[in-house]
Amino acid sequence: MVVGIAGELDMNAVPRLRAELDTALDGERPPRLVLDLTETTFCDSLGLGLLVGTLTRVRDAGGDLALVVANGMISRLLTITNLDHHFATFPTVGEAVTAIAPHDRGTE
């Protein structure tokens, strides 16, 4: 599932987004989630907490989470906070979706 986050990811947006992510994570098992942050203009500590909490939930359920980030504020924030080493980040939604897609593990 792809969830786009536009505008500010702050104390005002986090409750609504948390509810949306809860719904998304209640679906597919294991969860495979792409968060498109290319239109996100600001992220505060609550927003970062939501991203980290979502990553933990997805991994605990055996799933994958990918972030789509453009060069800009969100990319710098992930680097400054060292979170760029914990999240799989991609420049496009297509690349993120491909990276977390289930792979055929059949034998030949």
Image (cartoon, grey):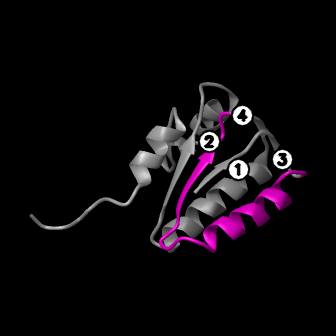
Mark 4 crowd level (few <14, some 14–19, many ≥20, 10 Å Cα): some
Q: Dot 2 lies on which element?
A: loop
Residue denoted by label 4? 39
Q: Amino acid at mark 1?
A: Leu
Residue denoted by label 2? 81
User: Which mark sits nearer the N-terminus, 1 or 3?
Assistant: 3
> Which quarter of the picture shows residue 27?
bottom right
The magenta segment is: 12-38
Image coordinates for residue 79, horizontal then vertical, percent: 57, 35
The residue shown at (51%, 32%) is: 91
Estimate the spatial distance between the alpha carbons at disc 3 and disc 2, rounded to whole Å. 16 Å
User: Which mark sits nearer the N-terminus, 2 or 4?
Assistant: 4
Residue denoted by label 1? 48
Q: Dot 1 lies on which element?
A: helix
Taking depth in this image into account, of 104 and 31 the one nearest to the observer is 104
User: Which mark sits nearer the N-terminus, 3 or 2?
Assistant: 3
